[in-house]
Image: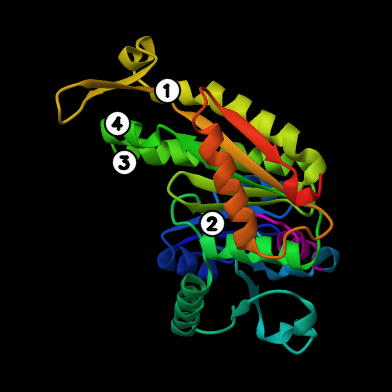
Amino acid sequence: MKAIIIVKDRVEKKIASLIEEFFESVQVILSSQDYVSLIYMDPPDIILIDRPSLFSNEERIVQEFRTNTIFGHLPIVAVLTADDLPEKTWKEIPIDDFINADDDAQAIMSRLEFIAKRSLRDIDTNPLSRLPGNESVIRHIQRMFDEGRDVAVAWVDIDNFKPFNDRYGFSRGDEVILATARIITNAVREINDSLSFVGHIGGDDFVFICPGRDARTLCEEIIERFDLVIRNFYNEEDLANDGITTTTREGTEKAFPVMTISIAVVINRGSSYSHYGEASRDATDIKKYIKSLEGSNFMIDRRGAGA
């Protein structure tokens, strides 16, 4: 597991050594830094916060994470002392667990083990992108519909990904998926709206949610960034040929253009959708059409909006 620990000044030596021993990687971030942006660059599996950072500004850091639509699902663990425990009404502070820094090393390690096991079991996170996975995507979209939110739901798919993966290997394919995840996440993040959400269904399929008014701008921005970056993943020979040429089992050559991206968008307005499956069905029809077109494309279907 990957962990970050947010501290006021520095990590207490005993805690630092135990955390570094337990987790595969640990990033220390000062609470005075732009910790949200730093986490976007390298998403963790768990967030630890030391007591000075936790208690400053009325638990502002915890609230920032809890209201973040992309990382709000991550478990937050406080590093406390025995004296802290009776001082707070902990149900009012949305942390998931705590470590008592006054405990002995074995007790702290055991507690970390319990926390980690529960986190891995509870969190539906794509292991590659660290974005919310398929179950989280479905739950989030359904909640938007149940609340009657006026949102756009967009399904994103990379075109010609499989031929690229076959030619360059899974490792290179994973790099493309990670780059695509960052492009979508950063574009959605920049609109800075509380309704926004990004999920990774699996493979080269993503979903994002945004206010309906921002859908067109976001699609255009994602396509522009994707088309600019994707050519960097091909070698010079394939770029000269505008893509990959392979030989089929029948001995004929087949050409696959440089990867593009397709975005199918449906609009929920006035509680036009009552179930996730309805929106998914409409998006599948749209995606089937736009994937037949050349280049990167998007299409916004307003049938669900009553337009």
- Quarter of the C terminus within the rendering: top right
Q: Position of residue 230 (x, y in %)?
A: 48, 26
- What secondary structure is marked by label 3? helix
Foreground pick, 255 / 48? 255
Instruction: Of the two numbered discs 1 and 4 on the same chain, state the one appearing first in sequence.
Output: 4
- The magenta stretch spans which residues? 59-70
Q: Amino acid at mark 3?
A: Phe
Instruction: Of the two numbered discs 2 and 3 on the same chain, state the one appearing first in sequence.
Output: 2
Q: CA distance from mark 1 to mark 4?
A: 13 Å
Q: Is residue 82 left or right of residue 16?
A: right
Q: Is residue 91 above or below residue 78?
A: below
Q: CA distance from mark 4 to mark 2?
A: 28 Å
Q: Which residue is mark 4?
A: 168
Q: Amino acid at mark 4?
A: Tyr
Does residue 134 appear anywhere in the picture?
A: yes
> Local crowd at mark 2 within 10 Å, few (<14), some, or many (≥20)?
some
Q: CA distance from mark 2 to mark 3?
A: 22 Å
Q: Which mark is residue 258?
A: 1
Q: Which residue is mark 3?
A: 170
- What secondary structure is marked by label 2? loop
Instruction: Of the two numbered discs 3 and 1 on the same chain, state the one appearing first in sequence.
Output: 3
Q: Residue at x 49, y 76 (%)?
A: 112
Q: Position of residue 301 (x, y in %)?
A: 70, 42
